[in-house]
């Protein structure tokens, strides 16, 4: 990968991180309704996969969807506005944070039902195939999807009809803490493999490894060889299910990549070992691909853009309450 | 190619509508098999053979296959999806009432979901406890879906075509005992508007609101009543969502008496229609609103017991007489 | 061990009932987690810890897990099964309405199916289109199930225990916004009979039939109306199936005016209650039956829009005034 | 296996065959409602498996259930009565032929939903385990069950919680004719195997082989080692989905086992190659375990018993129609 590509991955992860941090700020500043499902800590998987797609490829995501949309360039002001239920939101405030929808950047319905996105993505793949499109379909989902029978059914349909769909599974199941899946399979990939779907697994912390694996998987699917199951293994971010707005691992300070002494607190180990952004920053510096100043400059730009979008969203109006009863004809 | 107006049975009318749509629009695609049922009318399906892989026979995976149709519809196809027996669609309940029903609204109108979920419903002779469910009330109860219930071959054709060209998810319920019903059906791209009731028979003494197969029974009941000099009006809403409240209320305003005939259990369509009239038509009511629907227990297999559960012309006529006596 | 009559919140009352049952009967077993919800009341679940593996935390496989509970109940256990958000139970719709609902009847009474399916329902602040469904109307529509909806901590305890000892499958729907509600709750093996409405407030001008959270809103509405000298009676059926028709009709006979308050969409519980009164209580009616329930569209996330969708005391009081003006 | 065991298997298969033949006669003689799902042709699998169970083991079956109930000794008069919807039926006429229930011989609810019986059986296994029973649970189901997500979920639950359940799968899927399952897996057993469940496959025509395999599988489950998946491969009987009562392969004449010349008609090949009863008859004669007269004597007795039960059922009364609206309290 050349410098430009690698920095693009870095910037993409930062965009996601700063976006989610601002979602937490919104939740603190406004009487925020609904539960947050943040993408912090999974940026390596999301950025690595999304940057391997073409603009016209269509993805379906779960309720933990912000990262993918930011990665593919959805308007952040409209996304923040949706998080706040404003008329200017991606879904005019009707959907809310779990259902952000942006066909302009290749996102159709996002389902908050475990097992929803994988089956919709199979349907999109069917639709693309029937319409003779060169685009492919992508399902972003977590290991929990394989607990649901519909996840299994969807894999079977894709394999049976050789549909152009990439199954992008983020596995953060972990014995000990209640995992998000309880599968008797010794390895998640045994399920797609049993249904004759080729699989690969990659360390989700390593954005560059994910990106390479995703490019190969996308090539397989685009070549008409049928579905592919790519699994990115992750360590759940301590705040990934938080009910109340908080920064359990603090606001990310990328200089921790070169000043590890700054890392502290009860989740210091997670930050040191699992933060994909700090990890890539280290590699970029390590092999002299980038300087600290370059990384800080990217961060400054991203942070400011994000804040501007958030502030615009906060000022934007709510929809008219009585329009709730209007269907879209 | 579709024929010009001609006699055909209900099953043929549905297939005719699908052929018209597929001939006019390459985006129309079908999922399912046995669309004409398993009886003598099943042959109608043969007309679909020439369309090859535009008709997909799926595995027995109702939930994922329902989502396949929904996802495909979001990506530009117009999907006609047939579940076979409606009870199999219970396996895809979340996918229809919580995914498809919300898809368009939830996106702020940015997505279209032109998918039509079709299925057989109701008491069908020997279905027994697990194959006799009425599903229309349950679908109508979940906002976001359009719910249509043709009672005649012409309406079957017209409602299939209107459903296919609606950008919201639609559920169409067909009573298997209607498949052999023959009548005149308009040719070509014939559409029946949603939310417009059909008055099958004019009358002045009592309004019989009937749905799906009960329309046939209501018309028989009207004949029985006519023999006693009772003039019954038979109104069929045709679509439950949207519901033509004005149409129903207009008839009630004329007659002041109502019988609602529906195969479904309580907490359903007959309840809703009665409730609407009790709220918005109260002033014109001269007597209690009678419902003729199935008793609130599972459906037994034993033939006489099943008959006991099933609304029919006799039961409707008896209810009409009760309102007139009240 | 259960406490003697004492103040506790709704969540604690449910847990108390489960502890009483498990202490008295080794066959009582629980499937699920987060029975007390995710709010401040969640702590109540801690009382279940000592029961070890009599409480099973299942995978996210609603359909098969619902059948696990049903099969286990047929084999002699008394199962309390909690789905969490009711919308997740949509994934097990066939298993509850077509398997559990029919199991006992279908066997000619030879099998028992003492399983209680519990879940959270309704508009809960920010649930958005996919997490705000009302399911009670849908369950009540499918014959064979008993459907119970506690509105107070005492009824929550008493209905859990009655459900556990019923040999038919029961569905219990809990409104998450009620979990913090505190009130006096009887100790020990306290049972609330099915099919017996509770009159929460006597009145003579108008009957407000309210369910689940709407009981709280109806009582607030009654206070507002009292200020204008309007005397409202607040009746809570408590169980939808069986429905205490006589209890509702007795109140209507007294007042002649009815408002039905229910969060659910049309084609549901409010419809059924209105229909029953329009048929069997017609003679006593002086005015149209008003329903206060949610508009028939999906539930938007935007807070003011959600509030617009949600029945509350103001809307109930306004409806009561309309019936009195009519 | 000793002579007695082998003849028991033979008689059990014949009982099933003669029962189903009489169901066809009932369907011809009475205006029969509902569709028939007959067990003819699968007797090798049903008899082989059922005779490996203890009386207190509990089974759940699909709508194709007659064979198992007959095999385990359910009262045939009550079964025929149920098929006819009579008050004297196993389910008082409420259930009908697809739902025959007989707890006295170890049958709880039979579900007519594909995927129903397997998940109920897992629940029964859970209930038996919690009650400290030594009995095991059995799920009889067809390959179609693996099309349904709930089939996969049920397998996962059984494996996760090491439940005492035998998965007895009758596989009659066959490329060419529309199979009853459309699975992308190269072999059905790959699905349970992916979920870490031990599996075995056996030729379902060979009742003795099925019986040996079933005994081993039952021993595994009864020993507390968790679930086992046993697959019996079958060739679908030409009438297995018939809508109208008919004898596509004629009324079985066991002398065809020694006078193959008698076999004729458009389904002669099925009769020759796949009828498990004629096949076992040949082996029993071949190794001199039984004589033609012994087999004919068994058949005569079974046929007469069955006919007596059928005639009694035909004379039995219907339930009172209005009792339909009565729940069982
Ligand atoms: C059908 C359904 N059942 C249950 C839930 C509740 N739920 C929300 S998130 C979640 C865990 C999902 O795990 P996974 O898909 O791996 O995502 P993760 O949270 O690990 O990123 C569950 C069970 C749901 N949303 N949908
Ligand atoms: C949930 C559900 N979907 C569809 C059906 C319709 N159906 C009845 S039998 C059958 C095939 C079942 O195949 P299998 O289980 O292998 O049994 P077989 O007929 O091959 O013995 C189907 C799909 C059903 N009964 N239940
Ligand atoms: Mg996960
Ligand atoms: Mg099969």
Image (spheres, coloured by chain):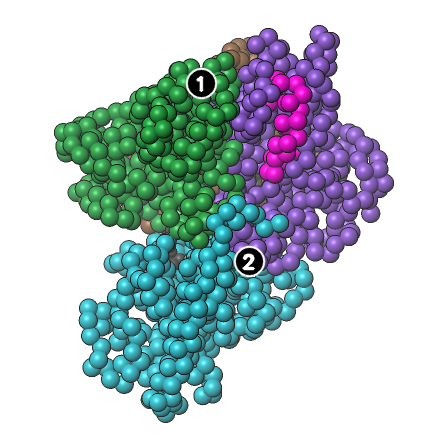
Chain colours: A cyan, B purple, C green, D brown
Quarter where residue D24 is shown: top right
Question: Which of the pair D306/C201 is nearer the observer?
Answer: C201
Q: Which residue is mark 2?
A: A122
C67 to A267, vertically: above or below:
above
Residue A316's x, y, as percent?
Answer: 46, 63
Is B258 in the magenta? yes
Number of other residues with Cα within 10 Å of mark 1, as a class: few under 14, some 14 to 19, many 20 or more: many
| Image quadrant in which the N terminus of chain D is located | top left
Q: Read off the magenta span.
A: B237-260
Residue A272 can be seen, yes or no: yes
Which chain is indicated by disc 2? A
- Residue position for label 1: C256
Q: Position of residue D230 (x, y in %)?
A: 43, 45
Q: Is residue C63 visible?
A: no
Drawn side of residue D270 relative to residue D288, left or right: right
- Asked which secondary structure carries label 1, the reply is loop
Which residue is painted at 37% across and 36% down in the image?
C313
Disc 2: CA contacts within 10 A as few (<14), some (14-19) or many (>=20):
many
């Amino acid at each position: 990968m050349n410098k430009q590509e690698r920095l693009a991955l870095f910037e993409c992860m930062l965009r996601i991180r700063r976006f989610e941090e601002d979602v937490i700020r919104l939740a603190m500043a406004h009487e925020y309704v609904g539960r947050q499902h943040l993408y912090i800590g999974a940026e390596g998987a999301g950025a690595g996969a999304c940057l391997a797609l073409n603009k016209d490829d269509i993805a379906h995501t779960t309720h933990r969807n912000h990262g993918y949309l930011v990665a593919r360039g959805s308007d952040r002001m409209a996304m923040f506005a949706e998080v706040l239920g404003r008329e200017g939101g991606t879904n005019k405030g009707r959907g809310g944070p779990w259902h952000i929808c942006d066909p302009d950047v290749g996102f159709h319905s996002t389902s908050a039902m475990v097992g929803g996105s994988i089956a919709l993505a199979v349907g999109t793949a069917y639709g693309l195939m029937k319409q003779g499109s060169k685009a492919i379909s992508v399902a972003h989902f977590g290991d929990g999807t394989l607990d649901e029978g519909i996840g299994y059914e969807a894999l079977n349909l894709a394999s049976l009809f050789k549909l152009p769909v990439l199954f992008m599974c983020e596995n953060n199941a972990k014995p000990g803490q209640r995992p998000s899946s309880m599968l008797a399979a010794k390895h998640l990939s045994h399920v797609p493999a049993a249904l004759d779907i080729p699989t690969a697994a990659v360390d989700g912390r390593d954005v560059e490894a994910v990106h390479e694996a995703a490019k190969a998987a996308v090539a397989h699917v685009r070549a008409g060889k049928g579905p592919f199951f790519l699994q990115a293994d992750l360590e759940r971010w301590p705040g990934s299910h938080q009910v109340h707005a908080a920064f359990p691992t603090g606001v990310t300070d990328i200089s921790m990549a070169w000043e590890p002494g700054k890392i502290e607190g009860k989740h210091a180990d997670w930050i040191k070992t699992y933060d994909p952004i700090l990890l890539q920053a280290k590699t970029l510096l390590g092999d002299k691909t980038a300087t600290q100043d370059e990384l800080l400059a990217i961060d400054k730009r991203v942070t400011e853009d994000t804040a501007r979008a958030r502030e615009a969203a906060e000022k934007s109006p709510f929809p008219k309450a009585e329009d709730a009863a209007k269907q879209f004809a | 190619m579709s024929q010009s107006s001609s006699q055909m049975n209900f099953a043929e009318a549905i297939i005719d509508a699908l052929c018209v749509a597929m001939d006019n629009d390459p985006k129309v695609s079908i999922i399912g098999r046995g669309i004409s049922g398993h009886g003598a009318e099943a042959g109608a399906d043969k007309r679909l053979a020439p369309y090859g892989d535009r008709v997909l026979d799926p595995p027995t995976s109702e939930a994922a296959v329902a989502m396949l149709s929904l996802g495909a519809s979001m990506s530009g196809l117009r999907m006609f999806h047939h579940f076979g027996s409606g009870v199999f669609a219970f396996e895809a309940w979340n996918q229809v009432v919580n995914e498809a029903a919300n898809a368009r609204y939830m996106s702020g109108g940015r997505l279209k979901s032109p998918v039509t979920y079709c299925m057989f419903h109701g008491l069908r002779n020997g279905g027994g406890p697990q194959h006799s469910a009425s599903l229309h009330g349950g679908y109508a109860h979940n906002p976001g879906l359009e719910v249509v219930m043709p009672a005649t071959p012409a309406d079957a054709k017209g409602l299939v075509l209107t459903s296919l060209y609606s950008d919201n998810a639609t559920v169409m319920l067909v009573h298997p005992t209607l498949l052999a019903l023959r009548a005149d059906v308009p040719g070509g791209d014939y559409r029946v508007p949603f939310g417009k009731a059909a008055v099958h028979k004019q009358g002045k003494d009592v309004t019989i609101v009937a749905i799906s197969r009960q329309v046939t029974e209501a018309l028989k009941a009207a004949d029985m009543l006519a023999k006693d000099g009772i003039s019954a009006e038979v109104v069929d809403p045709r679509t439950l969502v949207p519901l033509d409240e004005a149409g129903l209320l207009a008839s009630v305003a004329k007659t002041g008496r109502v019988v609602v005939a529906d195969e479904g259990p309580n907490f359903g369509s007959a309840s809703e229609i009665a409730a609407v009239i009790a709220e918005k038509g109260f002033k014109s009511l001269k007597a209690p609103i009678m419902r003729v629907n199935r008793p609130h227990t599972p459906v037994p297999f034993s033939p006489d017991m099943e008959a006991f559960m099933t609304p029919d012309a006799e039961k409707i006529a008896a209810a009409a007489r009760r309102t007139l006596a009240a």
